[in-house]
DNA sequence: AGCACGCCGACT
DNA sequence: GTCGGCGTGCTC
């Protein structure tokens, strides 16, 4: 045996490192078979359960396990399960010679459990400090966080960062005033309009755990309907949690709850509240002083006592997807909570996502829908303007708005406010030749051309202006991108109707409500103000802009945004009219005309099942530098029924493109692979990816690999 | 991520 | 001999 390094000492010295480690381990085990909490200088320890199992608050995946610490006598009382602690952690001070251990930084953690004996064979370090005696991490929340971490191949510490708000000492010092007893069981109110609506409320009120996908009728009643479901749950002696996608709907539900339950019965947990207020409200919930919660996505983890109902409104809104690792989605987390806590589940919206349709199809939830007569009575009349109409429409070319749109606005303004939905910048699709539809590209770098507010063309990649575009394919010189920003549209409409005020609502300034007086209200999707008494008409000008996006959800998203705008318009019987500029043959457009979001989602679901697309199959996106990605995929022990698609270059890593959040570092070229598994193997896929990632990080893999379960933007 | 341990060459 | 390079592996 000729060994290259020729140490020649024989025995353990020349063994390969992994064997060495094994030998060392064996020696250590033999010396200290089971450690009683031996610590520095034999300082006095807690008499009962002297070991604290601690989750150290580091998001690193290979530290995603508990560490045992000795509990000094003076911390015995405070170091209860669930409290925040500080511990020494790190390789520092392996100086056991004089029986003292020091070094390693102080880091935060949570006591998960108190136990009699550690199974760690070595001297335990002691808890350095109990940050506060407030138990913030109870077993339910820990279990949920664990489940979410597994579901999304993330670390427990990362999830806890989302689930437990940062401590605020002043907020903690204040006592939470308990809510007065809740009002008695409610009447079903407008829930009568839905087939099984009254039954659903009755079940909640009597302590049941019904699960429903609710297709809300257009109009403003949805918030009150949610409040009634909450009220029914409170009447059963249980708590309720409502999660909405943004601050404005949160304010609506807040107002409805106050109107129905009075003050002090519920807490509002939104991100924009500021640390002290956030923690105060969260603590009131945790302490059981408040039993009902409405909030935005971070509230999905709210530690509501004796949870009886979880509600998610408008689950298709991107606001429900957390943008911190591991990117949990409100709908999925609340599904987990409903299953784990055996509580009621209500997923509602004017539209219907494919995932929601799947919950119904699998039998996990029941549909809560109104019959066609109710829908017809509540919905506005929807008319379309397609390509054919536009081509025949001379006026449209001159004025950039179809004749039908002008007529509808003119008529609507005689009876009240008119809503104009225009695309947001990010949703404007590539410009194309109006004649042959070839995409308009920059002549220098072939980047996509984009119209600026002032109307001139500019390359999205290199920024060069293009003053004299013509189509290289057919010689045409007209571009098909009449869609312009909100301001431009507002100016133009304002000139056409000089007697009418024009109001705009968009990202910079969002209007909450407008009066019933005639006005033009120009808004980007999601920022539409509510009109008192409803809009007389709405113009949806972003049709093909939204449908043109190269995204699996383009159709579903477009329909959702249209329905959200159209739901603010008066019923057809009261003259409410909607005009959508989009091809009437397209499935989402037809679904809008018939006001049939469920039918759309069901067909979409069937199609995705056939093509092996999510959510029927489960997918994960794995991205990183090409070599690192290849190594990762080779090393990962993926489930045998998984299929790797790609890798392909990550769109948007070309130089000069605006960087997207969570994307690669600037100037780096990344690739992305999609891993697909059939239904039922989702958990195995997440586990395999998590294991591979942990192994990689433990080996000190410096090149980052990003894993995202259920990626949102798969072309 | 830090940080110590340990196995290598260059030095007083 | 012993000081110090940085390559591996552990952190209760």
Image (spheres, coloured by chain):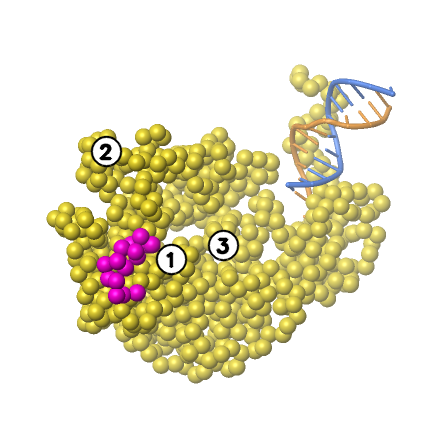
Chain colours: A yellow, B blue, C orange
User: Label 2, on which residue?
Assistant: A471
Residue A679 inside the magenta-drawn segment:
no
Compared with A83, A321 (above or below) is: above
Q: Is residue A654 visible?
A: yes
Label 3 Cα crowd, 10 Å radius (few <14 / some 14-19 / many 20+): many
Tell me if A362 is positioned left or right of A331 in this view.
left
- Residue at image position (19%, 32%) is A474
Tell me if A157 is positioned left or right of A261 in this view.
right
Q: Earlier in the sequence, mark 2 or mark 1?
A: 2
User: Label 1, on which residue?
Assistant: A506
The chain identifier of the residue carrying mark 1 reads: A
- Residue at image position (60%, 36%) is A700
Query: Residue A708 at x, y = what percent?
Result: 45, 45
- Residue at image position (49%, 54%) is A148
The chain identifier of the residue carrying mark 2 reads: A
Task: Please provide the residue range marked out in magenta.
Answer: A486-501
Q: CA distance from mark 1 to mark 3?
A: 34 Å
Tell me if A563 is positioned left or right of A298 in this view.
left
Q: Nearer the viewer, mark 1 or mark 3?
A: 1
Say yes or no: labels 2 and 1 on the same chain.
yes
Give the mark count.
Answer: 3
Q: Nearer the viewer, mark 2 or mark 3?
A: 2
Query: Residue A227 at x, y = what percent?
Result: 40, 73
- Residue at image position (58%, 48%) is A59
Q: CA distance from mark 2 to mark 3?
A: 51 Å
Classified by dominant secondary structure, the portion drawn in magenta counts as helix
Compared with A641, A352 (above or below) is: below
Q: CA distance from mark 2 to mark 1?
A: 33 Å
* Residue toward you, A454 or A413: A454
Q: Earlier in the sequence, mark 2 or mark 3?
A: 3
User: Label 3, on which residue?
Assistant: A148
Q: Is residue A555 visible?
A: no
């Amino acid at each position: 045996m000729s060994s290259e390094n020729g140490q020649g000492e024989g025995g353990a010295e020349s063994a390969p490192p992994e064997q060495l480690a094994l030998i060392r381990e064996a020696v250590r085990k033999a010396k200290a078979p089971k450690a009683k909490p031996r610590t520095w200088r034999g300082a006095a320890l807690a008499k009962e359960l002297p070991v604290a199992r601690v989750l150290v608050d580091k998001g690193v995946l290979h530290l995603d396990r508990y560490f045992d610490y000795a509990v000094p006598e003076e911390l015995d009382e405070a170091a209860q399960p669930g409290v925040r602690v500080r511990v020494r952690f790190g390789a520092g001070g392996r100086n056991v010679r004089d029986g003292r251990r020091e070094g390693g930084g102080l880091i935060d953690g949570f006591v998960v459990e108190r136990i009699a004996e550690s199974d760690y064979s070595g001297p335990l370090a002691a808890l350095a400090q109990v940050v506060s005696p407030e138990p913030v991490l109870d077993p339910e929340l820990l279990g949920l966080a664990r489940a979410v971490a597994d579901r999304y191949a993330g670390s427990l510490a990362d999830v806890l960062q989302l689930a437990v708000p940062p401590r605020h000492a002043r907020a903690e010092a204040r006592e939470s005033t308990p809510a007065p007893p809740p009002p008695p069981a409610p009447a079903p109110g407008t829930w009568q309009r839905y087939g099984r609506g009254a039954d659903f409320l009755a079940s909640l009120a009597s302590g049941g755990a019904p699960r429903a996908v609710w297709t809300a009728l257009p109009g403003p009643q949805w918030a009150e309907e949610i409040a009634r479901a909450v009220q029914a749950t409170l009447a059963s002696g249980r708590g309720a949690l409502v999660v909405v996608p943004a601050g404005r709907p949160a304010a609506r539900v807040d107002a409805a709850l106050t109107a129905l339950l009075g003050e002090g019965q519920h807490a509002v947990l939104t991100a924009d509240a500021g640390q002290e207020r956030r923690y105060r409200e969260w603590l009131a919930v945790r302490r059981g002083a408040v039993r009902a919660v409405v909030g935005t996505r971070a509230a999905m983890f709210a530690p509501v006592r004796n949870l009886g109902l979880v509600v998610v409104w408008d689950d298709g809104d991107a606001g429900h997807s957390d943008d911190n690792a591991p990117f949990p989605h409100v709908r999925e987390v609340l599904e987990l909570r409903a299953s784990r806590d055996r509580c009621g589940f209500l997923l509602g919206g004017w539209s219907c996502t494919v995932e929601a349709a799947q919950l119904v199809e699998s039998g996990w939830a029941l549909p809560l829908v109104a019959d066609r007569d109710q829908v017809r009575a509540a919905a506005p009349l929807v008319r379309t303007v397609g390509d054919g109409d536009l081509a025949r429409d001379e006026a449209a070319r001159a004025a950039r708005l179809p004749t039908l749109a002008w007529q509808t606005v003119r008529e609507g303004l005689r009876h009240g406010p008119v809503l104009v939905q225009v695309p947001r910048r990010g949703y404007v699709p590539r410009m194309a030749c109006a004649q042959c539809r070839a995409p308009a590209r920059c002549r220098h770098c072939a980047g996509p051309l984009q119209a600026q507010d002032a109307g001139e063309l500019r390359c999205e990649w290199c920024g060069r202006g293009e003053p004299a575009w013509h189509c290289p394919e057919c010689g045409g010189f007209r571009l098909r991108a009449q869609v312009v920003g909100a301001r431009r549209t507002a100016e133009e409409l304002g000139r056409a109707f000089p007697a009418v005020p024009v109001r705009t609502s968009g990202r910079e300034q969002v209007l909450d409500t407008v009066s019933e007086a005639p006005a033009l209200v120009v808004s980007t999707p999601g920022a539409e103000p509510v009109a008192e008494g409803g809009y007389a008409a709405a113009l949806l000008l972003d049709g093909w802009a939204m449908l043109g996006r190269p995204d699996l959800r383009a159709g579903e998203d477009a329909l959702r945004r249209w329905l959200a705008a159209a739901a603010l318009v008066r019923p057809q019987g009261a003259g409410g009219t909607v005009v959508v500029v989009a091809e009437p043959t397209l499935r989402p457009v037809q679904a809008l005309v018939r006001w049939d979001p469920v039918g759309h989602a069901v067909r979409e679901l069937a199609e995705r099942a056939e093509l092996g697309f999510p959510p029927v199959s489960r997918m994960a996106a794995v991205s990183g530098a090409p070599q690192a990605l290849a190594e990762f995929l080779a090393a990962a022990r993926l489930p045998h029924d998984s299929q790797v698609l790609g890798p392909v270059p990550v769109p948007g890593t070309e130089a000069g493109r605006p960087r997207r959040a969570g994307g690669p570092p600037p100037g780096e070229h990344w690739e992305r692979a999609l891993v697909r598994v059939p239904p039922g193997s989702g958990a195995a896929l997440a586990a395999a990816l998590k294991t591979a990632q942990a192994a990689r990080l433990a080996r000190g893999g410096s090149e980052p690999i990003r894993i995202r379960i259920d990626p949102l933007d798969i072309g």
